[in-house]
Image (cartoon, helix red, strand yellow):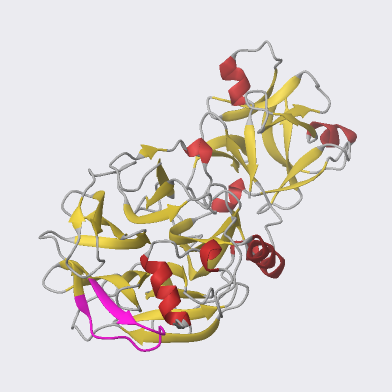
């Protein structure tokens, strides 16, 4: 008996095997296995100097270390509603293309209660088409925040889940087949206390919902065997890193085993993201990752992650371009980066403003083209150099002494060969390191103490 394409996809999806790899070759469905990741996000910084409420994109090979695209500028900005977005969510649809949903809000005036979501379509995240807003409800004085979406194989439709206030903070859902028209809103999850920022994924025959409990301030996981509204039971303990957390984001590893759970720090004055990992999403065993092991895109807030193919990764990089600047992340203080402040080179925990103080153009060494020099992005013509062994930011005076002082040879990291250390050009026994948060060059060797070697080890990252 012949089976329709829709029925075939539905059957595969119900089995829990509907992935990029498993549906390749189905009629009308052809995309390669996911080998990389894309992130959609907006940006904020403590004093909002880096705030931008357009759609930003980044890519990663491993899902941990990210490269912002388009110089970390938005690839598109809403032209309707409140003319800005928060909380963008990207979903690969059943036909292999993407849809992007986002909160209709520019800035932090959370009292502006839009009933709409921004929506774009995209074939491969190299262009954004079909921009529109869709109205999710008609509830008065009620927001439509932090959308997520999933394929409900039982219904043969997508569920769009979002935070809403209807007699309390709940998660609502509307069902759609095309992200153009939606059915009426329904309460999706209302456990008897306020909830926010749901993220929904389907794995096998189980639908997982992670959310923020507004009573405890912690993140929890719930699950359902059907994915139907009001069918979820919480099964995990509460999770938090840092002082506050929200916006749980579930990502299944492309390798097919293991998961990561991201959480946003909630405040732009705290670290952008925290991550946990687990071998099995069905258990209650999440392990916090060290910030040394991941680097989110610069200034990224409340984003979403989707698996992409190698071809899609290459196309996105070709279309949008990668940064022409770098940052230097400390090995033993992984929340901190090299920056200049009042002409002094130092190490500070990020985020801070001006956020550009940590951005460097790593150019050919001024005294030796096989080495490197660090030119400030926001103080062009000024370079990191040592003076009496202390590192400071000075304008290039063109002298041979300045060129030598501002030149460093890259070496394998003294504490970790996968990272990098920087040896002074004109004092070759000395390396760039931090001491009491100030940068300087000191004599170091393989015999130096472990702490000293760590102080002189950095990760070059966009």
Q: Residue at x 46, y 47 (%)?
A: 257
Indicate the quadrant containing the N terminus: top left, top right, bottom left or bottom right.
Answer: bottom left
Q: Position of residue 272 (x, y in %)?
A: 44, 50
Instruction: Name the foreground residue: 319 vs 366.
Output: 319
State the residue at coordinates (41%, 42%). 277
Q: Residue 313 occupies which quadrant of the picture?
A: bottom right
Image location (x, y in percent) of residue 287? 37, 37
In the image, taking residue 439 as reference, residue 408 lies left or right, namely right
User: With respect to residue 183, does 88 lie above or below?
Assistant: above
- Near-viewer residue (384 or 264): 264
Question: In which image quadrant can residue 24 be found?
Answer: bottom right
- Residue 419 coordinates in the image, percent (x, y): 65, 33
Q: Is residue 171 above or below residue 186?
A: above
Q: Is residue 184 magenta?
A: yes
- Could you say which is closer to the camera, residue 73 or residue 292? 292
- Magenta residues? 172-186
Q: Quadrant of residue 229?
A: bottom left
Horizontally, residue 305 falls left or right of residue 314, namely left
- Up the image or down, 49 lies above or below 158; here it is above
């Amino acid at each position: 008996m012949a089976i329709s394409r829709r029925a075939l996809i539905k059957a595969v999806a119900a089995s829990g095997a509907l992935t990029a790899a498993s549906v390749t070759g189905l009629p009308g469905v052809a995309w390669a296995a996911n080998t990389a990741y894309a992130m959609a996000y907006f940006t904020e910084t403590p004093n909002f100097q880096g705030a931008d409420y357009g759609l930003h994109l980044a890519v990663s090979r491993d899902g941990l270390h990210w490269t912002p695209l388009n110089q970390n500028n938005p690839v598109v900005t809403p032209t309707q509603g409140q003319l800005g977005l928060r909380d963008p969510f990207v979903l690969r649809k059943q036909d292999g293309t993407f849809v992007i949903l986002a909160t209709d809000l520019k800035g932090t005036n959370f009292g502006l209660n839009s009933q709409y979501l921004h929506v774009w379509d995209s074939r491969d995240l190299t262009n954004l088409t079909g921009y529109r807003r869709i109205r999710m409800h008609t509830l008065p004085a009620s927001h439509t925040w932090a959308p997520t979406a999933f394929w409900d194989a039982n219904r043969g439709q997508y569920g769009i889940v979002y935070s809403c206030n209807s007699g309390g903070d709940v998660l609502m859902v509307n069902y759609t087949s095309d992200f153009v028209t939606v059915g009426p809103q329904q309460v999706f999850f209302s456990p008897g206390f306020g909830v926010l920022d749901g993220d929904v994924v389907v794995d096998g025959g189980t639908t997982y919902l992670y959310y923020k409990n507004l009573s405890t301030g912690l993140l929890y996981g719930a699950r359902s065997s059907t994915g139907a509204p009001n069918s979820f039971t919480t099964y995990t303990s509460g999770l938090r890193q840092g002082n506050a957390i929200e916006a749980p984001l579930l990502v299944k590893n492309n390798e097919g085993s293991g998961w990561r759970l991201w959480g946003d720090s909630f405040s732009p004055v705290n670290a952008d993201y925290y991550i946990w990992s687990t071998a099995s999403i069905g258990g209650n065993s999440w392990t916090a990752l060290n910030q040394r092991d991941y680097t989110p895109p610069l200034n990224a807030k409340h984003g979403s992650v989707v698996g992409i193919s190698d071809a899609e990764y290459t196309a996105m990089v070709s279309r949008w371009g990668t940064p022409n600047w770098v940052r230097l992340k400390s090995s033993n203080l992984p929340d901190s980066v090299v920056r200049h402040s009042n002409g002094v080179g130092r190490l500070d925990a990020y985020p801070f403003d001006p956020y550009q103080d940590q951005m460097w153009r790593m150019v050919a060494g001024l005294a030796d083209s096989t080495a490197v020099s660090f030119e400030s992005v926001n103080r062009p013509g000024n370079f990191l150099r040592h003076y009496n062994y202390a590192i400071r930011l000075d304008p290039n005076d063109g002298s041979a002494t300045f060129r030598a002082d501002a030149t460093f040879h890259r070496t394998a990291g003294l504490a970790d060969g996968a990272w990098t250390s920087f040896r002074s050009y004109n004092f070759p026994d000395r390396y760039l390191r931090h001491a009491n948060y100030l940068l300087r060059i000191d004599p170091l060797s393989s015999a130096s103490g472990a702490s000293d070697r760590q102080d002189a080890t950095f990760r070059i990252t966009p």
